[in-house]
Amino acid sequence: MSKIIKTGLLSFGLSGKVFHAPFVNEHKGFELTAVVERSKKTIKEVYPNVISYDSLDAIINDDNIDLIVVNTPNNTHYDFALQALRAKKHVLMEKPFAITSKQAKELYDVAAENNCKILAYHNRRYDSDYLSVKKVLESGDLGKVVEAHIRFDRYKTDIGPKVAKETATIPGSGITYDLGSHIVDAAISLFGLPVSWHKKKGYYRENTQVDDFMYAFIEFPNNVHVHVTASMLVPNPQPSFVVHGTKGTYIKQRINLQEEQLMAGMQITDVNYGTEPKGVEGELTIAPNELDRKMIKIPSEPATYMHIFEAVYQNIVNGKEYPITKEQIIKQLEILED
């Protein structure tokens, strides 16, 4: 394969326009070759040289394409990825990777059989709030971690227009497979593979068919206890990360900065892209003993989703280990499907 990865997107809606196309287009190791646009044809307004196909079959049968980005509704992920892998295309899979751990295992097996890579796209590992927590944990300033709380809150009381997200009979609908996928991945990537877990789902919006609240208590090695919560009914969002250790506490608000900047039209080459504004720093409280307290503001480093595309490139072209592993994805789905 050429060192330029020719890439096709299965959708050019929000995720295609915001989370994938700008990075594929900017990274010198990729070429944005084609997308699928089943109704509205808008890709050429932004990327005039990109082919717009009408169907999945058409883009998968394009022999020039090396990588397929599966960024379609959750219930289609397994089938579309399977078709791409059998056509000997590499696959970058949006969350959730699949609906069940059994499906995930099969996709990894089919990828190996066809000498292809299937890689999970968890961009939230490259958000500034997550990266700041990771840095504090690695510093050892908290001592031994005792417990952590990871949240992803929104406030949307109405039933949304996306049928695939709001219909109980469609696999992968509801908040568990949406925001829950992000927070369970964050827990696993920060603390390792879980030892045990207990999960609850709630249905609170009027006339909802799907869960709009999920909570899981997850136990990790070294007696680390993690609470993950996602809710559609929080008008005052809580911190995204609260971590307590034997020597201190770290608290960080969720900063959805990159998505907001991209949706506002900011270019990823802008010097301010991914840089948090002042006043939203994380708060690290160090307690060397029972009487003393020291609070330190922790500014986040600039963040960019380009790092995940660089990891994809390095894995496909140079065989470097991909940070989001098969074992992590399978364990994540065991929790989501439970």
Image (spheres, rainbow, N blue to C red):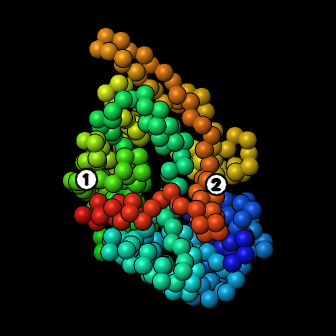
Q: Is residue 63 above or below residue 306?
A: below
Q: Left or right: where does residue 130 sit relative to residue 157?
A: right
Q: Residue at x 36, y 17 (%)?
A: 288
Q: Nearer the viewer, residue 18 or 83?
A: 83
Residue 238: x and y in percent read 38, 37
Q: Left or right: where does residue 35 sit relative to residue 73?
A: right
> Mark 2 is on which residue type?
Met
Res 321 quadrant in image: bottom right
Q: Residue at x 56, y 35 (%)?
A: 300
Q: Nearer the viewer, residue 202 or 273?
A: 273
Q: Nearer the viewer, residue 277 or 103?
A: 103
Residue 195's label in the rendered image is 1
SS type, badge 2:
helix
Q: Residue at x 75, y 62 (%)?
A: 28
> Cβ–Cβ below 8 Å for labels 2 and 1?
no
Give the labeled residue for mark 2.
306
**Other residues around mark 2 within 10 Å, as few (<14) / some (14–19) / many (≥20):** some
> Quarter of the image containing the C terminus?
bottom left
Q: CA distance from mark 2 to mark 1?
A: 32 Å
Residue 224: x and y in percent read 28, 41
Q: Left or right: where does residue 27 sit relative to residue 154?
A: right
- Is residue 194 at all visible to an observer of this figure? yes
> Quarter of the image containing the N terminus?
bottom right
